[in-house]
């Protein structure tokens, strides 16, 4: 089966995020354009309480939860904060690294 998942926690500094990530509604609209037609379509959820701080944003599309696939599953997601800029650099796409100087 074909499925796509996008998950993220609340941002510590939402004002520093690129425009696409300014709101989960914007992210969901973007994801629907590409993945909304897979399988059973897409669904978006926000888990947790805004009043208590952290919320978890989840988008799934396709056959993410088929009835016939009842085998137990587990996943682990790690969120890291307060990392040094030097160590984070390798995880950012910089277009200038790929542009020819010619």
Image: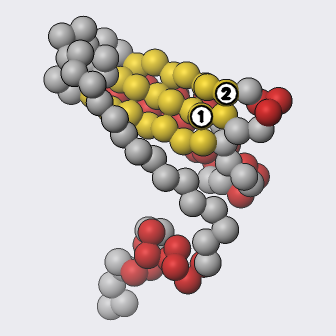
**Residue 33 numbered mark, or none:** none
Residue furthest to the front in view is 72
Q: Residues within 10 Å of mark 1 (few under 14, many from 20)?
A: some
Q: Are marks 1 and 2 in contact (CB under 8 Å)?
A: yes
Asked whether residue 66 is in view, the answer is: yes
Above or below, 62 relative to 16? above
Residue drawn at 61 percent across, 78 percent down: 84
Instruction: Estimate the x, y position of residue 95 in percent, counting from the top left.
Output: 43, 72
Name the image colouring: secondary structure
Above or below, 17 relative to 9? below
Instruction: Estimate the x, y position of residue 70 in percent, counting from the top left.
Output: 23, 15
Dot 1: what SS? strand
Dot 2: what SS? strand
Q: Residues within 10 Å of mark 2 (few under 14, many from 20)?
A: few
Residue furthest to the bottom in view is 102
Residue drawn at 21 percent across, 27 percent down: 2
Instruction: Estimate the x, y position of residue 93 in percent, counting from the top left.
Output: 44, 68
Residue drawn at 44 percent across, 32 percent down: 31
Q: Which residue is mark 1?
A: 56
Instruction: Estimate the x, y position of residue 15 in percent, counting from the top left.
Output: 76, 52
Residue 94 horizontal side relative to residue 64, left or right: right
* N-term mark: 1 or 2: 2
Above or below, 98 relative to 70? below
Locate residue 67: give its quadrant: top left
Specify the quadrant that holds the N terminus. top left
Locate residue 83: give its quadrant: bottom right
Residue drawn at 49 percent across, 52 percent down: 78
Q: Which residue is mark 2?
A: 48
Spatial CA span between label 1 and label 2? 6 Å
Asked whether residue 26 is in view, the answer is: no
Residue 52 horizontal side relative to residue 17, left or right: right
């Amino acid at each position: 089966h074909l499925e796509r998942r996008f998950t993220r926690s609340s941002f510590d500094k939402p004002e520093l995020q690129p425009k696409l990530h300014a709101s989960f509604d914007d992210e969901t609209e973007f994801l629907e354009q590409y993945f909304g037609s897979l399988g059973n379509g897409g669904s978006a959820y926000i888990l947790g309480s805004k009043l208590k701080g952290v919320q978890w944003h989840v988008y799934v599309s396709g056959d993410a939860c088929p009835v016939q696939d009842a085998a137990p599953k587990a996943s682990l997601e790690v969120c890291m904060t307060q990392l040094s800029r030097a160590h984070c650099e390798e995880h950012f796409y910089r277009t200038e690294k790929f542009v020819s100087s010619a």
